[in-house]
Amino acid sequence: MLLASMLPFEHTTLKKLNKIFHSPFPFLALQVLQCLIILFPGAFLIPYILFLIIAGMPLFYMELALGQYNREGAATVWKICPVFKGVGYAVILIALYVGFYYNVIIAWSLYYLFSSFTFELPWTNCDNSWNSPNCTDPKLFNASVLGNGTKYSKYKLTPAAEFYERGVLHLHESRGIHDLGLPRWQLSLCLLVVVIILFFSLWKGVKTSGKVVWITATLPYVVLFVLLIHGITLPGAYNGINAYLHIDFRRLKEATVWIDAATQIFYSLGAGFGVLIAFASYNKFDNNCYRDALLTSTINCVTSFISGFAIFSILGYMAHEHKVKIEDVATEGAGLVFILYPEAISTLSGSTFWAVVFFIMLLTLGIDSSMGGMEAVITGLADDFQILKQHRKLFTFGVSFGTFLLALFCITNGGIYVLTLLDTFAAGTSILFAVLMEAIGVSWFYGVDRFSEDIQQMMGFKPGLYWRLCWKFVSPAFLLFVVIVSIINFKPLTYDDYTFPLWANRIGWGIALSSMILVPAYIIYKFMNVRGTFKERLAYCITPENEHQLVAQGNVRQFKWIPLQVCGSLFLPA
């Protein structure tokens, strides 16, 4: 990010960490914008900012400090409390799952980029081989075409919608997740190009990724600024921006507003995927990660807020063009990026230029984010298994090639169903659970006091009372709340009008549990493989590895824990 010029990071790679989920357009980041657009634009900002302050920033700060002090990946960082090493394996597996389908979205962007190099964009008319007989020319479109109260965003017969679903995905050739078909060769080539770029960006670690990210992290800001300036000059843009900033305080009474805000601020900052820990481990020991946490998380959310203006100016323009309400053109998920925005671009003068610029931005954002996720997997496992570190290039190739093979399921005719399933289950409740266990492990077992002392060794000062309270009480409570709500509010998976069969939902939960189960499984494994009495086994499990000699002496710091003393220590002067 542009923050690179402000961070004294040895390889200038920390700047890209917060891009994983806040970036304005890639698929996972869209969850933040979905809430802004679909549910409650203005009302969403109040709980969003609140949860940023009480949970987002503290967790972001905690992971940066944890990685920087211990200089380890997501798994080996748990030498501070060995029994929680399963949390590291869980987040690595989750990051790997995300890589299976995230690269597919980047491949879509690359396909759109190649398709944009024409005098007339292929999604502007109904005269193409993939168009259906019912395709509707947007120039002839009016509100009466919809009928039955159908929103424009749900109307799938526009050239842009048909290009995405019929020309790119070939969704019409699949009857559901049980009928995937073969991978599309065009998307397979795009996916291969993406994986090759990622491999050569990561094969030498931060030596290469730190250079690549100068382009992938800064270019999107330039493009976003250009799109924003042009967007606000379009007719109807004012109405869109007004809808974005309007706050309906009555919506704040709805639990959904608060639940979604809590969930999205977590995804926005990207804590829990092992990426922050992995890249922070390359920091200089005395780097001011406190400043980095404040600046990065703040710029992260400010960028998301500003990107809302770029999006709502386009929504206002589209509503003006088609003479419908703004809420009728607002859409969510991939439809915003690959249908609505391309359609809007096609109506502008110089549409080819704007399309190329837009999809270059998507491509760089996606590669930047994917690099972070893959680096978390590579660093996390390489730090734990020396043979992988000794053959990092070969291991990087293995991870890249493995994600390519599994991603092929997502570029079949029914691949969007596989992608939707992974997007819902791979990094949903499971990542929330993993970060909850991470917060408990650091704050309650390793100890807030000891963690504060570690930070003091690095930067010369201890965290203030606010941070210690958040780490020990507020953030864990916040995460527990979101985990419980995410389970209670679960609804059977759907994609537009298609409802996933029961077996698909079960597979999804199996994927989610496959990572979560690693936490209790490793606790049992560790306890059973340590020798000694029950008390000694417990002591070895929760005592930092560099203090195991104290266990033999019966001097276990964790066993001296008294609730009142711990709580009271929070109020001691830093």
Image (tube, grey):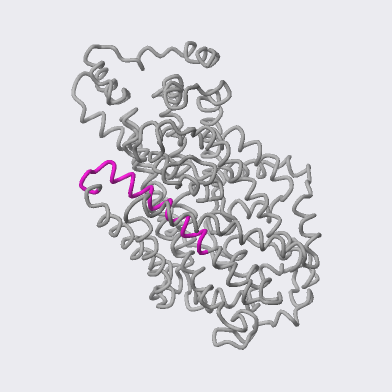
Give the number of marks: 0
Left or right, 52 with respect to 170, comes to right
Q: Which residue is at the front of the view, 327 or 346?
A: 346
- Where's residue 410, x and y in %? 43, 66
Report the span colored magenta: 363-388
Residue 87 is situated, as x and y percent measured from the top left of the image, at 37, 38
Quarter of the rendering containing residue 441: top left
Please state which of residues 433 and 290 is positioned toward the viewer in this rendering. Answer: 290
Q: Is residue 367 magenta?
A: yes
Residue for point 49% across, 32% down: 288
Point out residue 483 in the picture as x, y percentages from the top left corner: 51, 39
Instruction: Pick whichever, 358 or 448, lies toward us.
Output: 358
Above or below 102: residue 51: above
Residue 312 position (above or below residue 351): above
Residue projecting furthest to the left: 531
Q: Is residue 499 above or below residue 468?
A: below
Q: Position of 161 compared to 483: left or right? A: right
Is 148 rendered above or below residue 466? below
Q: Quadrant of residue 558?
A: top left
* Residue 121 picture location, percent across and down: 61, 80
Q: Nearer the viewer, residue 350 or 416?
A: 350
Helix, strand or loop for the magenta stretch, by majority: helix
As for residue 153 lying within the magenta part, the answer is: no
